[in-house]
Image (cartoon, rainbow, N blue to C red):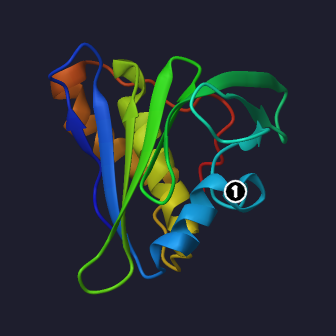
Amino acid sequence: MSEATLAATGPRPVLRIERHLSDPIEVVWNAVTEPVVMHSWFPTRIEIDEWKIGATLMHHFDDYDIGPVPGSVLEWDPLRRVSFTWELDTITFALTSALEGGTVFVLTEELRASHAARNAAGWDGCLDRLQFARERESWTTRFNRYSVAFEAVLGPQEGPPGIVNLS
């Protein structure tokens, strides 16, 4: 597992998390773009007719009393890169073949400064599920660690949005 890093040089901060996945790119690409498979690790159920630049998608919070959140596809380069919006945030998945086999998966999210620690902790858990990691830290432990690291750069960090399972 690698820690989320933060770039705060542009107009909005960008989180970056890199993971080495043992599966080949084709398998990982399916896991990060096929809505039924995504739902096993991604924080929302995504509804989309077809992945292509300009396509509209909806993020559904099936287990919570939250309405759908709209998004759109900004980049679509099969087996390499997909970028889409989630409300005001931009999420990008980039895949490359690892020299030692498997796939290097990089997730970036351009987001509101006050959400950096919260989202970093959440993405860590999501990517653990994507990797089928057996040992998992709690969301609270991750959030506390990221809050300390990010507050000095971005200011106070908001806690859970009221829908996060903190275990």
Residue 9 percent across, percent down from the top left:
14, 22
Judge from the rendering whether residue 2 lies leftward or rightward of residue 153; answer left or right. Answer: right
Which residue is found at the position 25% from the left and 13% from the top? 11
Which residue is found at the position 39% from the left and 80% from the top? 102
Q: Viewer-proximal residue, 25 or 91?
A: 25
Does 31 appear above or below 72? Answer: below
Residue 50 percent across, percent down from the top left:
73, 41
Which residue is found at the position 40% from the left and 24% from the top? 111
Q: Viewer-proximal residue, 33 or 55?
A: 55
To which residue does mark 1 refer? 34
Pointer 1 local density, CA inside 10 Å: few below 14, some 14–19, many at least 20: some
Judge from the rendering whether residue 112 lies leftward or rightward of residue 156; answer left or right. Answer: right
Q: Viewer-proximal residue, 99 or 125?
A: 99
Q: Quadrant of residue 161?
A: top right
- Marks counted in the figure total 1
Tell me the quadrant of the picture where the C terminus can be found. bottom right
Does 103 appear above or below 58? Answer: below
Extreme residue toward the top, this view: 11
Q: Viewer-proximal residue, 78 or 108?
A: 78
